[in-house]
Amino acid sequence: IPVAVYDHIQFNIFASSKFIEETYNEEKPKILEKYASMGYRDAQIEKDSVYVLSPNLVNIVIKVKEGKQYYFRDISFIGNTKYTNAELAKVLGIKKGEIFNQSKLDSRLFMNPSGYDISSLYMDDGYLFFNINPVEINVENDSIDLEIRIYEGKQATINKVMVTGNDKT
């Protein structure tokens, strides 16, 4: 039964299946991604071991050092003229005191599949040269202050549309 051990607590985190070392090594970083999504951005795998118990059974022990849990604190926007700070904060949808989650931040800034993110907001309005860069300006104790730097660029417009090779319409 594969387990992860943290401070003598065991969790059964893998589905029972055939153990394939290559797959195991490829999937192991997902453990850290899960910790990072819960605010433990400094989490590290300190040690992992695979023990063969019998020809059909292995035991996996993974020791994780969590580090401290981080939270979003102050989030500010600079460089924005098209949209107000309040409008951008609404699209970002991250409040002060929420657990820090880099994946959530990235999906709210860049090309979220739902289309509801700050990059899409600008690009859908013709700001094709738009750029956004979140910068951690202060990490203090368990809190992170972000400055979201925006370069809007010029709004692109359609100048001329030419259709060629169309004989029917």
Image (cartoon, rainbow, N blue to C red):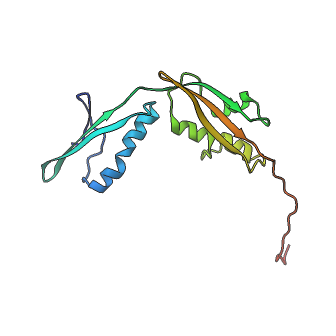
Residue 57, position as x, y percentages in the image: 16, 48
In the image, 77 versus 110, the foreground residue is 77
Residue drawn at 87 percent across, 59 percent down: 159
Query: Number of numbered discs present?
Result: 0
Quarter of the figure with the N terminus: top left
Query: For this view, does 147 lie left or right of residue 48?
Result: right
Position above or below: 151 against 164: above
Q: Nearer the viewer, residue 2 or 148?
A: 148
Question: At x 22% / y 28%, what residue is drawn?
Answer: 8
Task: Classify the position of the C terminus by image quarter.
Answer: bottom right
The percent position of residue 163, horizontal first and vertical second, equals: 84, 70
Res 121 → quadrant:
top right
Q: Quadrant of residue 21?
A: bottom left
Q: Residue at x 60, y 47 (%)?
A: 113
Give the side of residue 10 with respect to residue 161, left or right. left
Q: Position of residue 33 (x, y in %)?
A: 42, 40
The answer to which image quadrant residue 145 occupies is top right
* Spot occupied by residue 23 in the image (x, y as percentages of width and height): 32, 54
73 relative to 21, above or below: above
Q: Nearer the viewer, residue 167 or 83?
A: 83
> What residue is at 26 percent from the left and 27 percent from the top?
7
Image side of residue 133 versus residue 24, left or right = right
Residue 128 vs residue 111: left or right? right
The residue lying furthest to the right in this view is 160
